[in-house]
Amino acid sequence: MSDRPRLKLTGVVLDSPDARKLADFYRRLLGREAVEDEPEWVVLTAPDGGAGLSFQTDQDYVPPAWPAGPDQQRMMAHLDIEVDDLDAAVAHALAEYQPQQHVRVCLDPAGHPFCLYLPRA
């Protein structure tokens, strides 16, 4: 028997100067529905029951630079999103710097990097 309490990842939260604007971008990109929609807080559900994606307004938000140079805000996390057509999927937001052939680094409206990738066979 384990003493470890039950833990379950239920969501990822992204900060933004405008939670609703950023949530709308991901709503269109991923085809998710909002289950909470307030000016400062929006939650999108996962259709497969996986972790949700939430957005909170932070007026002091500083977007990360991609790729980051010295003394620039670095990303602390990013989202990986599996796709079936990489070229079609990057139409929303492509970053200039691309480090891998099977991955495309994109930027959301708040400057958060996220990766679209093809599954490896």
Image (cartoon, grey):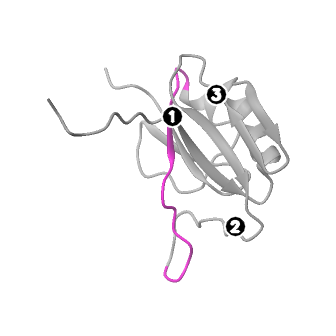
Q: Identify the amino acid type marked 1.
A: Thr
- State the image coordinates of residue 120 (x, y, percent, origin top left): 33, 25
The residue furthest right is 39
Majority secondary structure of the magenta segment?
A: loop
Front in this rendered view, residue 19 or 92? 19
Say above or below: 74 vs 28: below
- Give the mark toward the camera: 3 or 2: 2
Does 11 lie within the magenta span? no
Q: Identify the amino acid type marked 2.
A: Tyr
The residue furthest top is 48
Front in this rendered view, residue 5 or 97? 5
Seen at 54% across and 38% down, the residue is: 11
For the record, the magenta segment spans 70-85
Say above or below: 23 vs 113: above
Seen at 81% across and 37% down, the residue is: 37
Q: Which mark is residue 78?
A: none
First in sequence: mark 3 or mark 2?
Answer: 2
First in sequence: mark 2 or mark 1?
Answer: 1
- State the image coordinates of residue 88 (x, y, percent, origin top left): 64, 27
Local SS, label 1:
loop
Split into 4 quadrants, where in the image is the N terminus? top left
Seen at 67% across and 70% down, the residue is: 62
Front in this rendered view, residue 12 or 120? 12
- Give the mark toward the camera: 2 or 1: 1
- State the image coordinates of residue 40 (x, y, percent, origin top left): 80, 51
Q: Which residue is mark 3?
A: 88
Q: Identify the amino acid type marked 3.
A: Ala
Distance (Cα) linking label 2 and label 1: 23 Å
Q: Which residue is mark 1?
A: 10
Q: Which residue is mark 2?
A: 61
